[in-house]
Amino acid sequence: MSLKKGVLAEPVNVSVIVKDVVESGYATYVELSTVLGLEDAMNLLEIHQVTEYNKRIIEDIQKDNRP
């Protein structure tokens, strides 16, 4: 089954940014609501996205180089 938009649940009462940062493990909800600001959350989200993208690129390169 291919994934289509709307198949997976999305948060209703929590922003997607907060969800993604907490889900990534880069910060807790408490840290986001007390210590970190929006810019911090956006930076953490960018770090997570770049890291995951690079992991996929490395995996693809390794697959292509297998005998």
Image (cartoon, rainbow, N blue to C red):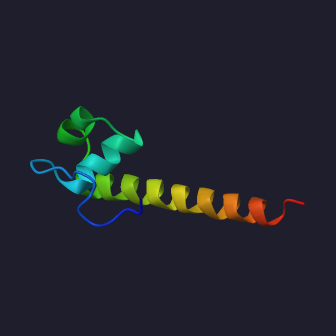
Q: Nearer the viewer, residue 24 or 42?
A: 24
Residue 35 position (above or below residue 65): above
Residue 38 position (above or below residue 32): below
Q: Nearer the viewer, residue 62 or 31?
A: 62
Q: Residue shown at 41%/59% (left/top)?
A: 1
Residue 57 position, x and y percent, is 64, 64
- The mark total stands at 0
Residue 56 position, x and y percent, is 60, 60
Q: Residue shown at 26%/58% (left/top)?
A: 7
Q: Residue shown at 19%/37% (left/top)?
A: 34
Q: Residue shown at 32%/41% (left/top)?
A: 22
Q: Nearer the viewer, residue 3 or 53?
A: 3
Quadrant for residue 31, please give it: top left
Residue 3 relative to residue 32: left or right:
right
The quadrant in which the C terminus is found is: bottom right
Residue 14 position, x and y percent, is 15, 48
Residue 21 position, x and y percent, is 33, 47
Residue 36 position (above or below residue 59): above
Q: Residue furthest left?
A: 13
Residue 50 relative to residue 24: left or right:
right
Q: Nearer the viewer, residue 10 or 1?
A: 1
Residue 50 position (above or below residue 33): below
Q: Residue furthest right?
A: 67
Quadrant for residue 30, please give it: top left
